[in-house]
Image (spheres, grey):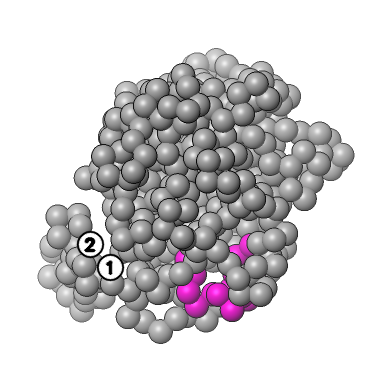
Amino acid sequence: MSLIQRIRSRPWRWFPALALALALAGNQVFGWIRPSALAGIHNIRHVIIIVQENRSFDSYFGTFPGADGIPMKHGVPTVCVPDPRVGHCVRPYLDHNDLNGGGPHASWDAANDVNGGKMNGFVAEAQKQTRGCINPQVLSVCAEGSPTDVMGYHDGTDIPNYWALARHFVLQDHMFESISSWSFPSHLAIVSGWSADCTRADDPMSCHSSLQPVNRSGANPTPFAWTDVTYLLHRAGVSWVNYLDERHPGGVSSIWNVLPGFTDVHQDHELSHIQDVARFYRAARTGTLPSVAWIFPDAKDSEHPPALVSRGQSYVTRLVDAVMRSPDWKSSAIFLTWDDWGGFYDHVVPPRVDAMGYGLRVPGLVISPYARRGYIDHQVLSFDAYLKFIEDDFLGGQRLDPRTDGRPDSRPDVRERVPILGNLAADFNFNQPPRRPFLLPVHPVTTLTPPAYTATRLRSVRPAS
């Protein structure tokens, strides 16, 4: 029976879906949100972006009801990825292991995983990496599990808090990494809309696009000469803080903690805005959260293989609960995502917007007292949408545009203006009264299987990306 026939046979069952579709259509014209729908965005006075590590959408939400998840028939995956070593293919499978190995995830790995749109290179790429080690000098991470664990996925029994937040708030099932590469360029793009190499730290026009940029070092402490969004925030007097999870030895890797490498952060004398996450909890408790905050984890809390899924979920729950308990909850929006796909399987072909991306699909959630309830956002999104939301909320729509932002650089395009990019404002209902907090247990009961080794070994682990 066709969709039209099903609607005609029982029209009353389709009224809620049709009403929602019409409501959304009424707020959007040719991909643009109507000004009246944007008016309520200023109810959000605190944007908190929580960035975790290395999970594809299908690996966490591939079986979430209503989402564009793993293709299945009668509960059995209908997709299968070749395993070159044994000559047959591997289907996605439910993996309750708390520790996952993942796969390599540099730019060439992304290209090979996508394989011209076939989305079938994941196992072959995972077979190329070294097993059982982590080398921070190697882009392609070493793995802890078998190469086929990139086909494993978790469900709501493994990650109950993430699924509960998705059911209660908004799940985005077409959120793509901005840059088709690994964590380091992804973090650059999260704060600036670009990843580049620059020949001179004092010349933003000397920069050129790079999927494998050079990191900062003692000899080159500010290699990122182009403009990041903190420049616009500083100029407009908008408060921002980058909180770092420094609870464990080693702290946050420099490949995730990128803002100290931007020339404009130094020129604006704003290194003090990079702070320990303990100050985030204090600001939440006292109702003094900044207007814009990014929160980056350390290796143990990151979910970056071999970090434990359970530990990352507990860490994120603690952050979200802190905002919900805060006097600032009624004016906050939390955007939760994972910075790249980590080599894990995903079935959706990434859109190509320019030479840099988009990268593979990752989970995205919106948590706010104004967020739609139990809503799945099917818009095409990338991390550029976070910049767009910040700019619309706090900067009057000013973009990181070298022609107008007062600090010209050589970026090839303005990512916030890419026509395919959706608008996060569609995930909110600013006409509803602010919703009450939805507190979750920091250590929920799960079906995750603990790894067969001690916590001592995990303390020595450092991620490669």
In the rendered image of this protein, does residue 149 appear above or below residue 440?
Answer: above
In the rendered image of this protein, does residue 366 appear above or below residue 404?
Answer: below
Where does the image place residue 349, in percent across and percent down from the top left?
A: 33, 35
Where does the image place residue 194, in percent across and percent down from the top left?
A: 40, 35
Q: Which mark is residue 120?
A: none
Left or right: 13 as drawn, with respect to 66: left
Q: Earlier in the sequence, mark 2 or mark 1?
A: 2
Residue 118 visible at all: no
Answer few, some or many: residues within 10 Å of disc 1's Cα (few below 14, many 20 plus, some between 14 and 19): some
Q: Amino acid at mark 2?
A: Ile
- Asked whether the residues under the numbered discs 2 and 1 touch, taking CB atoms below 8 Å apart as contact, a structural biologist would say yes
Q: Nearer the viewer, residue 258 or 91?
A: 258
In the rendered image of this protein, does residue 58 appear above or below residue 132?
Answer: below
Q: Nearer the viewer, residue 317 or 32?
A: 32
**Which quadrant would the C terminus be assigned to in this image?**
top right
Specify whether residue 321 is painted magenta. Answer: yes
**Residue where numbered disc 1 is placed:** 38
User: Which segment did they paint magenta?
Assistant: 319-334
Task: Please report the residue visible at 33 percent of the width from the left and 63 percent of the height from the top.
Answer: 425
